[in-house]
Image (cartoon, grey):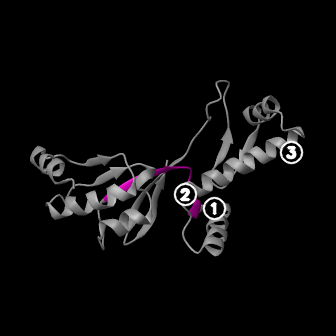
Amino acid sequence: DFTAVLTNVRASKAEAVFYGGYSAQGGPMLRQMRALGLGSIPMLGGDGICSSETAALAQLGTDPKAFCTRGGSMLERSDQGQQFNARYRAEYKRDPLTYAAAFYDGMHMLAAAIESTQSTDTKKVVQAIANGKYAGVTGEFSYDAKHDLKSSAVTVYTFKGKDVVPLKSL
C-alpha cells in the first residue's frame, strides 16, 4: 500500500514519480497513483518495471503514462532482434523476459572468446573479450582500456495495454 507516500507526492505537486523497483510493486503503485488522482504525472523506472507484468498488475487499459528503460538497442528495429524475438516466442510461448537478449548476447560473446582462444583459461578468455568486438542482438560490444563499453545503447519503453512498446533507442 503506497497511499501515504503517494498522498505526499500529490501534495508536493511532483512532475513525475521515479520507482526503482520491480513489477510486483511497481504495477500496484501505478494503479494506486491513478486511483489517487495522479494520472497526469508519469511513472518512470528502470528495467525492473519494464515488463508486461507491470501493466497487468496496474490494471490499466490505455496510456498509463509509464516509461521504463532497458540496456540495449530496440530489438524490433534489427533483423537479428526480430529473429531473436520470434525464436523466443516460438520456444517459450511468451515475450522475451527482460534480460533474455542480454543473457543471450553474453553467452554468445563468451562462447566466441572461448572458441577464438581455443581455451577456457580465464585470463585468455577475458583478454579475448577485452580486445575483441562482438555484434549481438542487443548491439555491438567492444571495450576501452579500462574495460568499459565503448558505447552502450539504452531503449526507452512505454506500455500499450499489457504490451511493453519501444519508443526510442539512445
Mark 1 to mark 3 CA distance (whole Å)? 23 Å
Q: Secondary structure at mark 3?
A: helix
- Residue type, mark 2 in image: Met
Q: Position of residue 143 (x, y in %)?
A: 67, 33
Say the numbered circle drawn on residue 137: none
Say the numbered circle drawn on residue 81: 1
What residue is shown with label 3? Answer: 115
- Residue type, mark 1 in image: Gly
Q: Residue at x 67, y 70 (%)?
A: 87
Residue 148 vs residue 42: left or right?
right
* 34 in the magenta segment: no
Q: Position of residue 20 (x, y in %)?
A: 36, 45
Mark 1, residues whose alpha carbon is within 10 Å: few (<14), some, or many (≥20)?
some
Q: Residue at x 68, y 47 (%)?
A: 106
Mark 2 to mark 3 CA distance (whole Å)? 28 Å
Q: Which residues are magenta?
A: 66-76
